[in-house]
Image (cartoon, rainbow, N blue to C red):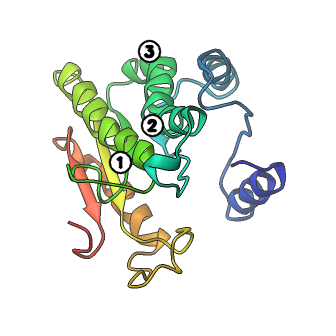
Amino acid sequence: MRSDADARTLFETVRDRGGWALPLRCDATDASEVQTAAEKLSALAGDCQTLIHTTGSFNEVRLDDTDPDTWREQLETTVTAGFIAWRAFAAQLRRHPRSRVIFVGDSAAEQLRARPQATGYYVGKHGLVLLARTIAAENQHSGLTCNVVSPGVLPNSIDLDRPGMKVNVEFVEIAGLIDFLLSPAADAVSGSHLIASRGWNV
């Protein structure tokens, strides 16, 4: 979350539904802050068994108008943040006989075609697939799996006013796919890029 109010609402919702939540604040692009958060989690709640990572700044700006700071932000909040999270939690995840890493990507994450808008964001999401498959390959003889789940157009997509754009997948449907990947039925699924878009943008 980018705001304290939104984060508090999320944690309260989890608790109201009978769940447990431990709020930890950190900059997902700062390796030292993420490492500190990982250590706090381990000390307060035990080692992490599941890492679900979803970050990414989508700045809808043309490549010609993209400045170096925006480019860095798009890359750092996608693939670099994913790498930092993996690096911080890898040891904890590997201590479990069965653990999961799931990155949230984008339905266009493997499409090698021009992306004039938010180019850095898409480069970063491509990179997440490569990162996930590398993690999967390096841990194939363990109980750790790593996959990417890529939604289509969600209710909070920022470009819904674009002609032809409409919501084609709900949050609960993405959660259902993640639930499957967390289940024993998905023990053999690793290194996969699963697109949930009803055939849109594939």
Name above or below for residue 58 compared with residue 95. Answer: below
The image quarter containing residue 70 is: top right
Residue at 51% of width from left, 40% of height from top?
Answer: 74
To which residue does mark 1 refer? 182
Q: Is residue 122 left or right of residue 29?
A: left
Q: CA distance from mark 2 to mark 1?
A: 8 Å
Name above or below for residue 12 compared with residue 74. Answer: below
Q: Position of residue 124 (x, y in %)?
A: 39, 39
What type is the residue that disc 2 sits on? Thr
Q: Secondary structure at mark 1?
A: helix
Q: Position of residue 193 (x, y in %)?
A: 23, 49
Q: CA distance from mark 2 to mark 3?
A: 12 Å
Question: Which one is earlier in the sequence, the residue at label 2 or at label 3?
Answer: 2
Depth check: give the residue in front, 92 or 79. Answer: 79
Neighbours of disc 1 within 10 Å: few (<14), some (14-19), many (20+): some
Q: Secondary structure at mark 2?
A: strand
Neighbours of disc 2 within 10 Å: few (<14), some (14-19), many (20+): some
The answer to whether marks 2 and 1 mark residues whose Cβ atoms lie closer than 8 Å is yes
What type is the residue that disc 3 sits on? Ala
Question: Which one is earlier in the sequence, the residue at label 1 or at label 3?
Answer: 3
Q: CA distance from mark 1 to mark 3?
A: 19 Å
Q: Position of residue 9 (x, y in %)?
A: 78, 60
Q: Secondary structure at mark 3?
A: helix
What type is the residue that disc 1 sits on? Leu
Depth check: give the residue in front, 107 or 135. Answer: 107
Residue at 22% of width from left, 53% of height from top?
Answer: 113
Residue at 73% of width from left, 57% of height from top?
Answer: 15
The image quarter containing residue 93 is: top left
**Can you tell which mark lies on residue 50?**
2
To which residue does mark 3 refer? 91
